[in-house]
Image: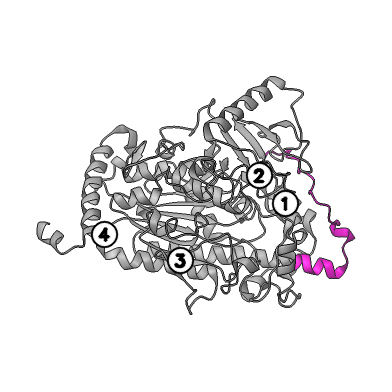
């Protein structure tokens, strides 16, 4: 070993030494009952990690959760693993990503509000930097230090500068879109001010390569290349595969769109009811679940002209094509792991970053004007050179049976599909109703890697200790729940906030989405948040509101001084 180290770079020496130390620590940790499920593995090898994040996928957009879109690869992966039926994300994309990679609430991790929407009175407040700040240590940093190969492909949205790039936060190889979204066929951005879309490869600004044909395919191929290039070295990997689909603009290959011609001709209400019926039949939702009314000031399906119905149905056909392509490409990377005998040694986490996107972009002049520069004819919709989105009515179908959509504190904004699959876990092939958070992913993977979070100091800097909780006891069959009956989850984004504790949820939404006061819901009976029980159970509401106030204080929540966003 001494002679081998002489031929390595200083960075490689550091990684090798960390790997040896971490492996020794893991072997010792594995002998303890706290990680019994891992310790029983004879070779005490540390597992690989594949974290798959899809962008703006609705809760009911998988066939596993009620959709008419077949997603056989994702479904099979979920059914082999532990489906987390009470999993919460951060409301929108960058807050969720900050929570995932830090194990912290996004208000502490630097994305108290999205970088694009920080209010004047929030500027300069700790936790409102608009990027993953230095007061947290990231998951890839700790895994890299412990000898893992660390890879990222897809969407970053946690910093636009050199110093806030993926390469500076622990990823050894990366190809990532820096901002919130882009064309799926070329480098067109979301708006004129972000055109062309910004990308970085291994920390350096780059343009898309000539072999870029479609985003979902490209990110899958890059991740497989990263893993394969280092496979012979024998080190475990952490792969962060953050797809940009099915985020708008809605675009998909023709062959995927064609599969869904005519599927959505009956309109929003009919598709939503069919999804709920499947969920009830499969035991995902209570038999008496009531759907919230579709919130919109737009005409009902029955009031649309035939031409308008064609356009609206085509939008959803494209969206379904995007989900279909995601399933195919996730199937491709899973097939690669199986073909190379890496599947059973890989912990796989799948999640959506927030609820389906329902923002009425056509009411915002920059988006409305930008969309007019594209060919959005019925014949060209979904192809390169088009720019469409499906807005609030289809978004609420995507979130069946939940209320509203992305950016809201209601279930439609934060309650997303998620599962964890690992052959080495005792509890697999089940659904679990434990209250779980995207913050829990980091402590879970660190536990499986045998890595201890440094607490309050990292690399000479003061940092926050993690807030998330490990799923390892749950996965090992040592616990039934991640959080006990007195542990809840608070949330806030865009002055919309809520608190979940057990079956109860306190919710505060401003006009026009709510009454501008606290409401109370029993989610065990009313997942759609249709029956406000605030007057019937004032004591429960008072307790939850106090808990939310404590959550806001501890995490430095700063409510916006600007008028509420509509």
Any mark on residue 396, and which? 1
Q: Secondary structure at mark 2?
A: loop
- Side of 491 where 420 appears, left or right: left
Alpha carbon distance from label 3 to label 4: 27 Å
Q: Are marks 1 and 3 in contact (CB under 8 Å)?
A: no
Residue neighbourhood size for the residue with mark 1, other residues' Cα within 10 Å, grouped as few (<14), some (14–19), many (≥20): many
Nearest to the observer: residue 525 or residue 55: 55
Whichever of callouts 2 and 3 sits on the residue coming sooner in the sequence is 3
Residue neighbourhood size for the residue with mark 2, other residues' Cα within 10 Å, grouped as few (<14), some (14–19), many (≥20): many
Alpha carbon distance from label 1 to label 4: 45 Å
Nearer to us: label 1 or label 2: 2
In reply to whether residue 291 is colored magenta, the answer given is yes
Residue neighbourhood size for the residue with mark 4, other residues' Cα within 10 Å, grouped as few (<14), some (14–19), many (≥20): few
Whichever of callouts 1 and 3 sits on the residue coming sooner in the sequence is 3
- Side of 293 where 94 appears, left or right: left
Whichever of callouts 2 and 4 sits on the residue coming sooner in the sequence is 4
Depicted 498 relative to depicted 273: above or below: above
**Residue at the farthest top position:** 539
Which residue is tagged 3? 200
Q: Are marks 2 and 3 in contact (CB under 8 Å)?
A: no
Alpha carbon distance from label 2 to label 3: 29 Å
Whichever of callouts 3 and 4 sits on the residue coming sooner in the sequence is 3
- Side of 339 where 357 appears, left or right: right
């Amino acid at each position: 070993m001494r002679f081998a180290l002489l031929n390595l770079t200083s960075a490689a020496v550091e990684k090798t030494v960390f790997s040896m130390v971490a492996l020794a620590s893991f072997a010792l940790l594995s002998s303890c009952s706290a990680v019994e499920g891992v310790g029983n593995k004879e070779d005490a090898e540390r597992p690989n990690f594949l974290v798959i994040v899809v962008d703006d996928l609705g809760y009911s957009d998988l066939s596993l959760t009620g959709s008419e879109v077949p997603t056989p690869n994702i479904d099979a992966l979920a059914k082999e693993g532990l489906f987390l039926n009470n999993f919460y994300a951060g409301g929108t994309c960058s807050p969720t990503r900050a929570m995932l990679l830090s194990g912290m609430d996004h208000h502490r991790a630097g994305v108290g509000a999205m970088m694009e929407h920080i209010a004047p009175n929030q500027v300069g407040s700790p936790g409102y930097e608009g990027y993953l700040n230095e007061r947290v240590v990231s998951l890839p940093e700790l895994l890299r230090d412990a000898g893992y190969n660390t890879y990222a492909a897809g969407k970053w949205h946690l910093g636009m500068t050199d110093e806030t790039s993926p390469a500076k936060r622990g990823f050894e190889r990366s190809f990532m879109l820096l901002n919130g979204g882009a064309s799926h066929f070329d480098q067109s951005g979301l708006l004129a001010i972000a055109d062309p879309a910004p990308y970085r490869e291994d920390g350096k600004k780059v343009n898309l390569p000539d072999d870029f044909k479609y985003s979902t395919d490209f990110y899958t191929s890059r991740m497989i290349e990263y893993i394969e290039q280092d496979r012979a070295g024998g080190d475990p990997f952490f792969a962060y595969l953050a797809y940009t689909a099915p985020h708008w603009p809605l675009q998909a290959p023709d062959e995927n769109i064609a599969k869904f011609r005519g599927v959505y001709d009956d309109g929003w209400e009919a598709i939503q009811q069919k999804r709920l019926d499947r969920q009830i039949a499969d035991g995902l939702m209570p038999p008496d679940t009531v759907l919230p009314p579709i919130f919109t000031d737009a005409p009902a399906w029955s009031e649309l002209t035939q031409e308008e119905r064609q356009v609206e149905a085509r939008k959803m056909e494209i969206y379904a094509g995007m989900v279909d392509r995601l399933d195919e490409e996730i199937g491709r990377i899973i097939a690669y792991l199986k073909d190379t005998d890496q599947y059973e040694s890989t912990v796989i986490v799948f999640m959506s970053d927030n609820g389906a996107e329902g923002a009425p972009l056509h009411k915002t002049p920059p988006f409305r004007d930008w969309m007019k520069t594209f060919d959005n004819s019925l014949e060209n919709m979904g192809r390169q050179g088009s720019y469409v989105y499906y807005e609030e009515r289809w978004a609420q179908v995507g979130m069946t049976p939940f209320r509203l959509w992305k950016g809201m504190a209601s279930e439609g904004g934060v309650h997303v599909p998620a599962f964890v699959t690992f052959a080495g876990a005792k509890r697999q092939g089940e659904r679990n109703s434990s209250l779980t958070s995207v913050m829990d992913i980091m402590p879970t993977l660190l536990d499986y890697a045998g890595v201890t979070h440094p607490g309050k100091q990292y690399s000479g800097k003061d940092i926050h200790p993690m807030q998330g909780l490990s799923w390892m006891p749950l996965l090992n069959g040592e616990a039934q729940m991640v959080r006990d009956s007195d542990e809840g989850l608070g949330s806030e984004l865009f002055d919309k906030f809520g608190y979940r504790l057990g079956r109860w949820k306190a919710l505060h939404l401003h006009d026009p989405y709510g009454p501008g006061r606290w409401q109370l819901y029993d989610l065990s009976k009313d997942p759609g948040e249709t029956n406000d029980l605030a007057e019937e159970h004032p004591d429960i509401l008072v307790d939850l509101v106090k808990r939310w106030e404590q959550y806001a204080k501890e995490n430095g929540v700063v409510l916006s001084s600007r008028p509420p966003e509509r």
